Amino acid sequence: MSEPSPHKPGPRARRIGDMLRVDHAGEYGAVAIYRGQRAVFEKLPHKQHTANVLEEMEAGEAHHLETFDRLLAERKIRPSLLSPFWNAAGFGLGAATALMGEKAAMACTEAVEDVIEKHYAEQIDELETVEPELAGTVRQFRDDELEHKHTAENEGAREAPGYGLLSAAIRAGCRVAIKIAEKV
């Protein structure tokens, strides 16, 4: 049995690299979504409450992104090659849902956070025995995402016109983005 090459990571390191890459891309996209939403609502003085709620959630996502930036650098893992796309797509999704109204913007947040919460839960299960400290970080971020999801629900996400279709489309897009970002 041959030992792994010192230049090529083993299967576990590659898997953790894939996890961190997709988590980084997801947080990058989440920050962009909130920026797109705030670009609309901050221009409307009567929508200041919504802009403030979004700004607070964006700050949480920015903290997550900074953490994943650091972890990628420490472990010498490249970020997704599609980062410019995630930025543009996230901003576009955020702005589009904001233009549809406050409840649609919250439906976007609720759908994204629902997918991410489940994605993080799967990672926690996988990391628990091999990287408990990283599992703890992901657990905290999952809890933050759940809080954002509940905030969006409390702000009327499910009252958005076409909620079912809008939510399903955003969830499907998130699941596809996760699969792509793991490798690209």
Image (spheres, rainbow, N blue to C red):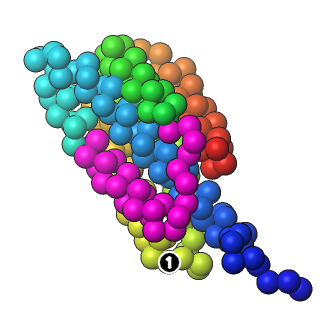
Give the residue drawn at x 17%, y 17%. 43
Residue 97 in sight in this render: no
Q: Which residues are magenta?
A: 57-83
Q: Quadrant of the C terminus?
A: top right
Q: In the depicted view, which residue is nearer to us: 7 or 165?
A: 7
* Mark 1 residue type: Pro
Residue 181 spot, x, y in % from top left: 60, 44
Give the residue drawn at x 63%, y 49%. 182
| Position of 116 relative to 51 (above/below) | below
Q: In the depicted view, which residue is nearer to us: 27 or 118?
A: 27
Give the residue drawn at x 26%, y 23%. 39
The residue carrying mark 1 is 132
Residue 180 spot, x, y in % from top left: 65, 41
Residue 4 in sight in this render: yes
User: Which image quadrant is residue 173 in?
Assistant: top right
Residue 59 is covered by the magenta coloring: yes
User: Which image quadrant is residue 71 in?
Assistant: bottom left
Tell how many labels. Answer: 1
Left or right side of 152 for 174: right
Q: In the depicted view, which residue is nearer to us: 184 or 132?
A: 184
Considering the whole magenta stretch, tell me its main secondary structure. helix
Residue 116 is covered by the magenta coloring: no
Q: Residues within 10 Å of mark 1 (few under 14, many from 20)?
A: some
